[in-house]
């Protein structure tokens, strides 16, 4: 059986990724709990507003616990207020301030992606990993998401993404790694990759440009 060919473009918007130690781990149990609550609310035809979804990202960085939440302690109230302010700031950053009181289910695919960006940014990361952020959106929306990613980098973030839309990658990336059938065939600046014969043969020839 012939192997299905799939282009995998890894774009590091920063040439080097500084590793400060530690390891990627599974999400803590309370995150899954939050998802269960959201699902129950969805089935009841109610749900958290957009700003509440983004606050979840901030809560991953707080010190309040279940007891604080039950007793509504001063620490909990302070962190909740900070979370709301952080969430609104992140929604403003991604261009969704006017939709803060909407439900995520009522947003377009492109807007949902922006919400995901806002949630990630609410955790105050130094590195953001994105897997096909432009999948399922049209050309204009792809350009808008690309501009948002550039804005994130200009704000001091390191962004590493996997994307199949070559035109987007060539426009926003500082450095690109190209894989074909799981094997790296090129790495360099967009111009270097664009002129690489192996890349041209595999992905950029004729009408194959995304």
Image (spheres, helix red, strand yellow):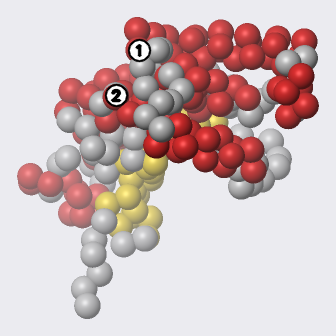
Quadrant of res 54: top right
Percent of width and height locating residue 67: 90, 31
Q: Outermost residue toward the bottom? A: 1
Percent of width and height locating residue 151: 47, 19
Q: Is residue 191 left or right of residue 28?
A: left
Query: Residue tagged by mark 1?
Result: 99
Asked if one can make out residue 85 in the rendered structure from this viewpoint, the answer is: yes
Q: Residue at x 73, y 29 (%)?
A: 59
Asked if one can make out residue 171 in the rendered structure from this viewpoint, the answer is: no
Q: Which mark is residue 79?
A: none
Query: Residue tagged by mark 2?
Result: 107
Please say if the residues under marks 1 and 2 sit with CB atoms less than 8 Å apart.
yes
Q: Of 34 and 176, which appears nearest the observer?
A: 34
Instruction: Tell me the SS state at disc 1.
Output: helix
Marks 1 and 2, how far apart in space? 9 Å
Quadrant of res 179: bottom left
Q: Is residue 17 left or right of residue 68?
A: left
Indicate the quadrant containing the N terminus: top left, top right, bottom left or bottom right: bottom left
Q: Residue at x 9, y 54 (%)?
A: 206
Percent of width and height locating residue 14: 55, 35
Q: Residue at x 21, y 63 (%)?
A: 201
Q: Is residue 198 left or right of residue 46?
A: left
Q: Of 27 and 37, which appears nearest the observer?
A: 37
Percent of width and height locating residue 52: 58, 23
Q: Of 175 and 144, which appears nearest the observer?
A: 144
């Amino acid at each position: 059986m012939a192997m299905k060919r799939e282009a995998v473009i890894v774009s590091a918007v920063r040439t080097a990724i500084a590793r400060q130690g530690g390891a990627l781990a599974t999400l803590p149990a309370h995150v899954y709990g939050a998802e269960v609550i959201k699902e129950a609310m969805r089935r009841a035809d109610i749900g958290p507003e957009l700003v509440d979804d983004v606050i979840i990202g901030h809560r991953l960085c707080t010190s309040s616990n279940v007891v604080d939440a039950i007793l509504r302690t001063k620490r909990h109230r302070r962190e909740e207020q900070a979370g709301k302010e952080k969430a609104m700031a992140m929604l403003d950053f991604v261009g969704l301030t006017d939709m803060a009181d909407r439900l995520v289910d009522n947003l377009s695919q492109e807007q949902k992606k922006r919400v995901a960006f806002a949630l990630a940014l609410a955790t105050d990361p130094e590195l953001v990993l994105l897997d096909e952020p432009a999948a399922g959106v049209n050309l204009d929306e792809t350009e808008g998401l690309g501009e948002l990613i550039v804005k994130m980098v200009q704000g001091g973030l390191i962004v590493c993404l996997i994307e199949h839309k070559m035109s987007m990658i060539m426009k926003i990336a500082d450095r690109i790694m190209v894989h074909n059938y799981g094997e790296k065939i090129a790495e360099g600046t967009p111009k270097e990759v664009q002129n690489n014969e192996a890349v041209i043969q595999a992905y950029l020839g004729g009408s194959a440009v995304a």
